[in-house]
Amino acid sequence: MVNFRKNIVRFCCENLYLLLSVAITVGFLIVKIPYIKLPFYWDEAWVYGPAVRTMAHTGISFLPNALPTELYRGHPMLFHVLNGTWLKIFGNTITSAHFFNLLVACTLLLSIFSISKNLFKSGEIAFTCVIILSLQPTFLAQSTLVLPEVMVALFSLLTLYFFIQNNYVGYFIFASAASLTKETGIAAIATCLISYIISSYKIHNRSWKILVRNLVKLTLPTLPLLIFLFLQKEMHGWFLFPEHIGFISLSKEDIWQKLVTSYITFTFLLQGRNLLFFMMIFALLWLLYKKRKVENLNIYLIFLLFIIIYSLIGSINFFSKRYILSNIPIFILISVGIIFSTFRNRYFLFAFLILFSGLQIKYINFQNNSDHTLGFRNAVKVNQEMINLCLKKDIKDESIAVFFIQGRIMTDTLAGYVKHNEIFTNLNNQPENAKYVIVSNYDTNEKFLQSRNLPQMKLVARFEEKKAWIELYNNNLYH
């Protein structure tokens, strides 16, 4: 019995930071449990959520014709297949869908611990990475949403890790998974290709035959995506969803604006990451002053290259702040690795974590109506309250003017707001031609906002939760 206790104590001491990281991950999961019961919000309400629930019902398939094009919108199918499979086994419900994506987020937390522990040989660095990632507002918001960004971040991180470790099997599996989850996953493959070319350039005696062979091997994970795109062309007549093509801009001004003011600024400086950035710069200056080399420099350069390539790819396309999530774990690894490899004092570690955690409360509590902060739950709440009121007033068959997402969630049972016998049957987008008008500050345009000021509009009800509000008006001129 005494030996058993000694072994337990020894195991806990030797694996202290692993146990603490597991505890943080379990705590993170528990804190997020209330969110899994929420109805879908925005993109998960009209695209991803209904898509995965439909696939669970109609059948699991990677083929482009497995779902209606307006649901999967030309994206590769791995995200849908994994979610659909889970739902088929554990129940096709919103709670089940959210819980699966929460498990993916917890996997990312444990992965960043394992990766940083193996790369930097430090439990302190690994534990710090887990703490900091778990306190990121975008990660906190996305961790339960049925959206592919957390999964892309996880697969991209694992792709880079296995490339650095020269583990081709692991690289091929997760690089293929990254590109099959979303097209932007090719950023991880491009990073590894360019990194290999640069490293090969430094080795003058490497033969062209070996170079070409390895480049082909590194490129192979794009093959599943290419097959999917060619099948899509054959079945639907296009490689990429036509509506998405319209979002692409090759204008230098547009690309530069998104790259600098959106991707780079958000990655390095916003939501509390400015502390990491400036501490990292200070650490690099300290190393320069002390004339010390940067440990693990090659790893940091590969990670930095990924951030640049991923940001460039994103800057060509439509921008949403949640897309930047793939950059955040990578930046955490760079900054924490440099900071704590430079300042090795354990007391500094704890002081930094206390300071960062305290400051991070401010950013976590800042909530707008977007899905990159926890404020999305406020919009979900007032949406549900407004729909419940309309059902209580028995106006679901009356003429109601709504903007975009409101119309989707009032007519699609898969979004979680209405049941089959509660679907609204007479919606339009013309406030002047409807008996009732619903206006909110998160799903609107100028026309709807201005309609509130028309003299014939009478306010019937208003629901407000922090920064989210929604109003119901009666149009007295409606005939």
Image (cartoon, rainbow, N blue to C red):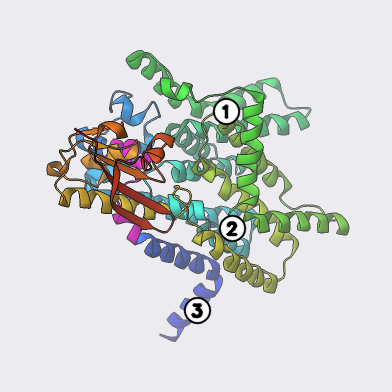
Q: What residue sits 73% from the left and 27% below the top?
A: 206
Q: Within 10 angstroms of label 1, few (less than 14), some, or many (20 or more) residues?
A: some
The quadrant of the image that shows the C terminus is top left
Is residue 37 in the magenta section? Answer: yes
Image coordinates of residue 360 in percent, x first then y, are 57, 63
From this view, report whether residue 352 is shown above or below residue 74.
below
Is residue 99 something that shows in the picture? no
Q: CA distance from mark 1 to mark 3?
A: 54 Å
Question: Could you tell me the amino acid type at mark 3?
Answer: Val
| SS label for mark 3 | helix
Mark 1 or 2, nearer chain start: 2
Is residue 22 something that shows in the picture? yes
Q: CA distance from mark 3 to mark 2?
A: 21 Å
Image coordinates of residue 441 in percent, x first then y, are 41, 46
Q: Residue furthest bottom?
A: 2
Q: Which residue is mark 2?
A: 117
| SS label for mark 1 | helix
The quadrant of the image that shows the N terminus is bottom left
Q: Within 10 angstroms of label 3, few (less than 14), some, or many (20 or more) residues?
A: few
Q: CA distance from mark 1 to mark 2?
A: 35 Å
Nearest the viewer among 106 and 317 is 317
Segment colored magenta: 34-51
From this view, report whether residue 246 is shown above or below residue 263.
above
